[in-house]
Image: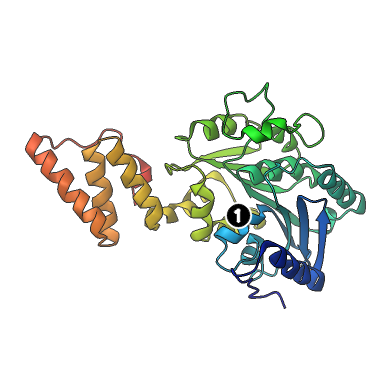
Amino acid sequence: MVVGAALSDDLTDTQWLCELEEIGEEEGYFSPLGDDHAAVFIDRTQSVLFVCFETLAGVRTMSETGVPLGFDVCERRGWSHLTLLAMRDRWYRSRHVYGYFDRLVDEGFFEDFDHVIFYGAGMCAYAAAAYSVVAPGASVILVSPQATLDRDLTEWDTRFPAARRLEFRSRYGYAPDMLEAAREAFVIFDPDETEDAMHASLFRASNVTRIRYRRGRSGALDSDLRAMGLVSRLSEAAANGILTRAKAARIMRARHQHVPYLRALLARTLAEDRPHLTARLCRAVLRWKPIPRFRHHLEVAERRLWRDGDNRADAEYSDDVAG
């Protein structure tokens, strides 16, 4: 029985994959896709299918239960879920993955579901966007996606040198174009991460909504959303047809009571030497919870402002610290 499934941290990667294969074979299927990828499908209902792209390392690092995100998002809701698992960072650019999705289309697999939701972050968000084309009318939720790593189009992104050897011009290549058939796509990104913001700007179709989420550390957005259960809430809103910019903003206000996010904001205001904003952030946090770090930095900021005789409000006070 998959409900409540968990896999031990003590397993080797090979053992972990064997255990996941057993779960898949019991409740749906597990399909290796060459040496670098695999698919696991859990068959529950035809109302909603949650399609998630993840890496083996990411699952084993981020999941408290040691299983892919789809289990956490879907099992309580009774949704079906399909996980595309990458063993290496190859951006899912593989003929085996192309062929797998081709087979699903030929079989009419996605047509069996009332609503399909694609989710991914970073490299996996690229793949979620690129392969969403196989399910017209899908909802797509992307966290810090790359649009492509084609050298001629993104020479400004030097973060992934090994991926420069990959080919991004053939099938399922340019992620923004592959969203054309989606009902809606939401791109969540940190505008202070230059490369992420530049990639996000390439997703510009009318069915795309870009959502800013200032975090101050690359790769942290996905972990925030998972830790707060917001992937589940965003997906549920999408499944119910009510996910809009305003709805997404209301859901993500939960970060104003997420301590890692608040600490990142505090680190940013301190690094930028903005005592007004530091004081306002600390006051907002302390109204919610007496966290010693914020009490200390409030006292430091207030002493500095008193010493300087400066009681101005910070003119650039942001909703990020509204609490």
151 or 106: nearer the eye?
151
In which quadrant of the rendered image does the N terminus lie? bottom right
**Residue 311 falls in image quadrant:** top left
In the rendered structure, the answer to whether residue 303 lies left or right of residue 220 reads: left
Q: Position of residue 163 (x, y in %)?
A: 67, 35
**Residue 95 falls in image quadrant:** top right
**Residue 285 falls in image quadrant:** bottom left
Amino acid type, residue under disc 1 in the picture: Gly
Residue 183 visible here: no
The residue where tag 1 is placed is: 58
At mark 1, the secondary structure is: helix
Q: Position of residue 178 (x, y in %)?
A: 74, 36
User: Which residue is located at x 44 percent, y 35 percent?
Assistant: 192
169 or 72: nearer the eye?
169
User: Which residue is located at x 62 percent, y 55 percent?
Assistant: 57
Please say if 42 is above or below 91: below
Please say if 197 is above or below 111: above
